[in-house]
Image (cartoon, grey):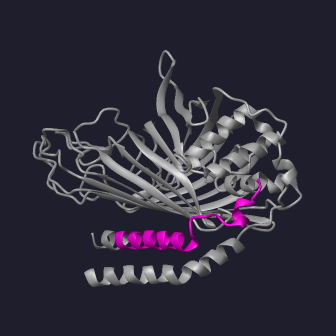
Amino acid sequence: MKIKRVTLLSLSMMAAILLGPVFSTYVYAQTDSIPNDSVIDEAPNKPQGGGEKFLLAGEVFTIWQNNHIHGLPSTNSFGADPLGLMLMPLVKLNDRLFLDVQVVVNANPGPGGGASVSLNEAIISYRIVRGLNVFAGNFQPRWGLYEGVLDDFTNRYCSAPIGMGIGAQTESGIGIQGGIQTGYSKLSYQLYIANGPQLLVDSTGMQNGELTYANYTDNNKNKAIGGSLAFLPFSNSSLEVGVSGQYTPETGDAGTPFENIHSTSFAADLNYYHMFSPVMLRVQGQYEYTQTQNFNLYTDATNTTLLFPQFNNQIKGWYGGATLRLSGIQNVFLSDLELGGRLGELVLPQNVMWGGNLMNQTTLCLTYWFTWKTPLNIAYDIYTQAGSPTQTAITVRGMWFF
Amino acid sequence: MKSIISIKTIVVALVIVMASSVIMNGCKAPEEITSKSGTQLWGENCTRCHDAPDPHTFSDDQWDVAIEHMHQKALLTDTEVKKIVTFMKSAN
């Protein structure tokens, strides 16, 4: 295995050395021919402005869903009771300092009504030099393509991919990030230290081995380290290939036998678009897994039916999809329609209460774009799982990003 | 576990290929890249995730803030941000 790894690495290096010069010529050929309109670029007489600047952005959305489990009557539900609201106050304090906050307001459907407000992100970032920004706060790390990037109005498949939500989620920490031009290509990076996930262990055993994020306070003295690296090889930025990772040396509560249980998460993603006039093609995909150290978590379990205390605590998931849009035709209505198809899979641990058999998802979605940030999605999802009846869902989602 | 080890090896290899290609390309941007207009960068970068935004969506000051948000979210380069902001302000 060692020899094979060394061989593979050596071959990769040789490929890079041989292909580098060829690559640098080819990637420029991918540039689309958009006219260089220097007249539009010039704005010599407009004042530059200065001081603090504020923008309240956000989105309002509503989701209606019809769920059908084979053999049972279908059910209808509104996903956002009936409207969901996300507010995003953004403050540019000066040319270097920026504050980015995201809160979600949920209506309380229960007796008495009211609303709950939850904090998604609160990040302060400071540009140190070109290509280097330091940030701190409560943030969604760069984790593949979906979480925090293509999970709002940009999600052309409407429903969330089944295999996502594994690995790094909103965390409290500090890091550095930036985008760098490297010849014809670009690199973007992020590196951070955060509280990391916390391991769930309780006497019922119901959630033993699961990881929870969004922890404002850490449950032990060790921190998680994570990062991402994305490569955009073509000069028109049409292709992005990325890898993300996070390692947490201690996930359990301090002072418990589970304190030193470590966890490793990894993701790889791809995002590509190209105009094959008049059709715009988009291809997106992501693979991710989380491996938490195998450990007997049931030492104090009160449930004596737990016959299999040991399990392989690994979760894997992936999705891949493509969309087509007739962006290049004259008909306005047809040019604003986008058809998408996606496949996905989720592999949960076996022999654990929160685990299960392999789950698959197939999605078809039609989107109508009222504006560049106001989509109406209609999606049809099919969920299958060995040993369970097939489930289908029809989802209609309206979203207005302001 | 076997498949994880081989995936890790593949990832390490990919990172090495990326890094090596970058070194071969060189860090200095060629003239074809530095001469790109704000219009072109707006069309290329914004389309990665969504349609290129209508410049009339926001005012000048609001574009300063909105593009800085995208600077941090999409990890655009500083040069790209500067040119795109200039274009949006001139076209709104």
Percent from the top left, x then y, of residue B25? 58, 72
What main secondary structure does the magenta stretch of the protein show? helix
Is A195 covered by the magenta stretch?
A: no
Q: Nearer the viewer, residue A151 or A239?
A: A239
Residue at horizontal 43%, vertical 79%?
Answer: A13
Position above or below: B34 against A169: below
The answer to whether residue A127 is left or right of residue A216 is: right
Q: Which range of residues does the magenta coloring cover?
A: B8-37
- The quadrant of the picture occupied by the N terminus of chain A is bottom left
Q: Nearer the viewer, residue A324 or A377?
A: A324
Q: Nearer the viewer, residue B82 or A221?
A: B82
Would residue A338 be seen by someone viewing this image from the given angle? Answer: yes
Q: Nearer the viewer, residue B28 or A138?
A: B28
Percent from the top left, x then y, of residue A157? 61, 54
Percent from the top left, x then y, of residue A263? 27, 53
Instruction: Please tell me how many numbered marks the rendered image carries.
Output: 0
Residue at horizontal 72%, vertical 55%?
Answer: B41
Position above or below: A105 against A352: above
Q: Quadrant of residue B59?
A: top right
The answer to whether residue A306 is left or right of residue A24 is: left
